[in-house]
Image (tube, rainbow, N blue to C red):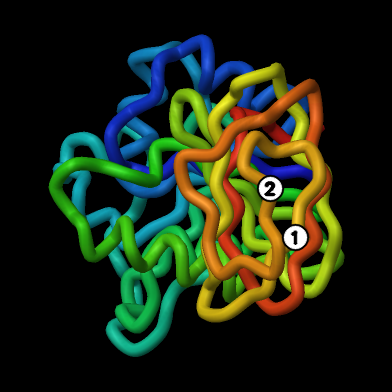
Amino acid sequence: MKYTIIANGTFTPKNLIKAAIKNKTVIALDGAACKLMKYNITPNIILGDFDSLTLQQQTLLGILPPSNQHQDEAPYPGHKDTTIVPTRFDQDHTDLQKACRYAKAQGALSIDIVCAFDNVRLDHNINNLNILKEETTKTCDIRIHSTIQTLIYAANTTITIHGSPNDKCGIFSFPKASINSTGLKYECHNSDNSTSNSLQSNSATVNIKGGAIVIMPLQFNP
C-alpha cells in the first residue's frame, strides 16, 4: 500500500497535490479535508481530532460527535465513501504522527507528506523533522515535500539523489553523522553538514554513517 498524507499547513497548488496522490491512498488531516474539496479531491480517509473544523463542516464530511470520553472511537464510514478515523483523545502526538502510524499499521510501504509546513506554527515545522526520523523505517519510505524540494531521513546507508545539474540539495546531521559524497558541487568528506549544495549532473551518491536529514529536488514516491 502507498499513502499520501495531506496535512493542514500552507496548501500546495492543485497540480502538485494531484501528482502526490496519484495511485495512492489519501489521508487528509483534519481541516485539510475541506481544502481538498475545493480542489474537487475526495480523500479516502479523514483523520484527526477535528478541532480545525466547524460543526457544519464536520456534518458535511460525515464526522460524528465523540461517543466516549475515555478512548477514541473505531474508524467509521463518512460521506462520499470516505473513512473517518477519529483521534480526539490522543493529545500526546500530532495528527501527522498519528496518520503515519495509522498508515504503517495498514501495511504502508511508502508515505508522501504534503502541506506539512507553514509560516505560523514553527513548533509543528520542527516537530515534523522528528516525526520523519521516528517513523521512517527500512520497510516504509517516508518523504515530506515542499513545492520544489523533498526531505527524507537516512541512517547508515548510501542514497542516490536524482535531479538536474545545479539542482539545490543539502544534508544535515540529525543528530550526528559522517557524510561522504560523489557528484555534488561541494563534495562531502566526513562532513557533519552540507548546505547550499547542488548536483553536478543528473545524480549524486551520498554515504551517511549515523543519521541525517537529506534535502533534494522534488521526488514523490513512485
Q: Amino acid at mark 2?
A: Glu
Give neighbour class at mark 1: few <14, some 14-19, many 20+ (Cα, 10 Å).
Answer: some
Locate the C terminus by quadrant: top right
Q: Is residue 60 above or below residue 4?
A: above
Residue 180, which numbered label? 1
Where residue 214 appears, as percent x and y from the top left, is 60, 52
Q: Could you tell me which residue is drawn at 33 percent across and 70 percent down?
A: 88
Q: Is residue 105 left or right of residue 117?
A: right
**Residue 45 numbered mark, or none:** none
Note whether 169 is above or below 21 in the view shown.
below
Q: Is residue 216 left or right of residue 36?
A: right
Q: Are marks 1 and 2 in contact (CB under 8 Å)?
A: yes
Return the mark for residue 187: 2
Instruction: Name the residue nearer the viewer: 100 or 72.
Output: 100
Secondary element at tag 1 = strand
Q: Is residue 152 above or below residue 162?
A: below
Q: Is residue 174 left or right of residue 30?
A: right
